[in-house]
């Protein structure tokens, strides 16, 4: 460690003396989201153990001290560098994590970390709400002042640039604070990353996601998976459920985010433990397998080495099960998952992009029906075929499984979603 205690260099991060007679304990008991302590002790120039620095994630990722004006100035320089090159905006990772409260011990740091994992089953919903409603290192009021300054930077360009916040806060209504008119443009919605294939769960997720942003005049975003969570096919257990849920999400008002490989119907990659790279796996000594399964590269060409992803060895291996999911195979198959997504995006752009109104219609048990303008979305959630009375004359636009329409009767296979357009 070249810099000294009290130096300008250390002031850009969170360096503090430890506790105990020999300052051998970290400043507080906070845990890293990647496992282990959130503090690492440095070795000073004299070779002796010295101060501790904070890293809420990996030890190679020290947290910046946003109370130091040099930090903001450097970020403004970085933002403008990319904006001057013409980027349209930014995804703000852990947008709720820039500002910390007083460095005090937490009554249950391990359970708090479990509650922060999106897919954690170690805590109940009530425990999660209680733990996440008062986090000393996340969702502090000071983050909003930072984003108000960012907003001025983004608006100084023409056309104005955008930013989307990745943040996980409770209660969910707090998400609205990040997308107020003078802050960021969008906030990731994690409800569909967790939702079960069950009618009430899906409908509740839709309603909650829309309602929490209504007061600030914003629409929600929709995502089925991301680099931190299991792929939707693996999580739900079937491609049919994944594509049926995809068509629901693509038909909703707001913005849809598609994680790489979702449009191919990829499952989590099969990995040997020796192949895992995630610091979560390393720092928990294998107790948590980490997120590598969702981070396996995309298969582009079934005939090439590494399925066309790279000529050298990729950081994670692609197994033979990915071969038939390759882009070159799917792109020429009209019934492929890739072409389902491509067609749905095209239809969405034509009919749904500029309409935010969603109206639920009466429906049989285990069937979800909603309307947006002249588009009817019908999803058969159950494991049996359904015959559904339509409220008028409709033509089929798209479906993830074969459907039939005869005399205003819609016949749907189990686990299927379709979009219908009202006849003139």
Image (spheres, rainbow, N blue to C red):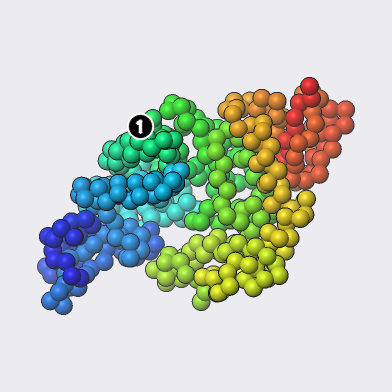
Q: Taking 292 as reference, is 67 left or right?
A: left
Which residue is painted at 11% across and 68% down in the image?
Answer: 21
Q: Taking 191 as reference, is 179 left or right?
A: left
Which residue is painted at 71% across and 30% down in the image?
Answer: 376
Residue 225, horizontal then vertical, whole percent: 55, 51
Rendered view: 112 above or below 390: below
Give the number of callouts.
1
Quarter of image, res 50: bottom left
Comparing 232 with 373, the one in front is 373
Name the quadrant of the C terminus.
top right
Quarter of image, res 249: top right
Rendered view: 341 above or below 330: above
Residue 281, horizontal then vertical, whole percent: 45, 68
Quarter of image, res 13: bottom left
Q: Taking 221 as reference, is 198 left or right?
A: right
Comparing 122 with 349, the one in front is 349
Q: Which residue is mark 1?
A: 182
Q: Residues within 10 Å of mark 1 (few under 14, many from 20)?
A: some
Q: Is residue 303 visible?
A: yes
* Label 1: element kind: loop
Comparing 155 with 86, the one in front is 86
Which residue is painted at 64% across and 58% down in the image?
Answer: 266
Name the quadrant of the N terminus.
bottom left
Residue 261, horizontal then vertical, whole percent: 61, 56
Residue at the limit of the structure toward the right, as seen here: 407
Rendered view: 399 above or below 277: above
Q: Is residue 129 visible?
A: no
Which residue is painted at 50% across and 53% down in the image?
Answer: 119
């Amino acid at each position: 460690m070249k810099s000294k205690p009290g130096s300008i260099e250390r002031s850009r991060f969170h360096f503090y003396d430890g506790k105990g007679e020999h300052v051998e304990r970290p400043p507080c008991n906070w845990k890293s989201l990647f496992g282990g302590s959130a503090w690492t002790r440095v070795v000073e120039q004299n070779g002796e153990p010295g101060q501790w620095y904070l890293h809420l994630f990996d030890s190679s990722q020290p947290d910046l001290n946003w109370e130091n004006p040099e930090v903001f100035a450097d970020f403004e320089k970085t933002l403008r560098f990319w904006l001057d090159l013409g980027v349209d905006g930014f995804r703000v990772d852990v947008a709720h994590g820039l500002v910390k409260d007083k460095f005090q011990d937490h009554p249950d740091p391990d359970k708090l970390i479990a509650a922060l994992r999106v897919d954690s089953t170690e805590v109940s919903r009530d425990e999660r709400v209680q733990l996440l409603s008062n986090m000393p290192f996340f969702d502090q009021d000071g983050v909003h002042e930072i984003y108000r300054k960012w907003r001025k930077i983004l608006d100084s360009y023409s056309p104005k640039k955008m930013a989307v916040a990745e943040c996980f806060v409770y209660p969910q209504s707090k998400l609205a604070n990040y997308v107020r008119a003078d802050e960021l443009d969008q906030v990731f919605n994690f409800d569909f990353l967790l939702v079960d294939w069950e009618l009430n769960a899906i409908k509740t997720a839709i309603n909650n996601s829309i309602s929490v942003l209504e007061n600030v005049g914003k629409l929600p975003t929709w995502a089925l998976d991301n680099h931190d969570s299991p792929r939707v096919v693996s999580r739900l257990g079937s491609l049919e459920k994944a594509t049926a849920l995809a068509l629901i999400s693509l038909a909703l008002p707001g913005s849809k985010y598609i994680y790489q490989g979702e449009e191919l119907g990829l499952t989590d990659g099969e990995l040997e433990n020796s192949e895992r790279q995630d610091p979560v796996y390393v720092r928990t000594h294998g107790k948590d397998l980490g997120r590598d399964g969702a981070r396996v590269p995309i298969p582009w060409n079934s005939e090439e080495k590494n399925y066309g992803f790279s000529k050298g060895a990729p950081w994670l291996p692609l197994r033979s099960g990915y071969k038939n999911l390759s882009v070159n195979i799917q792109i020429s198959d009209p019934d492929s998952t890739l072409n389902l997504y491509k067609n749905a995006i095209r239809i969405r752009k034509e009919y749904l992009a500029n309409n935010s109104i969603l109206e639920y219609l009466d429906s049989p048990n285990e069937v979800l029906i909603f309307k947006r303008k002249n588009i009817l979305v019908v999803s058969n959630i159950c494991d049996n075929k359904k015959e559904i009375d339509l409220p008028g004359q409709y033509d089929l636009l798209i479906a993830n499984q074969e459907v039939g329409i005869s005399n205003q009767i819609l016949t749907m296979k189990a686990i299927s979603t379709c979009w219908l357009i009202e006849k003139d």
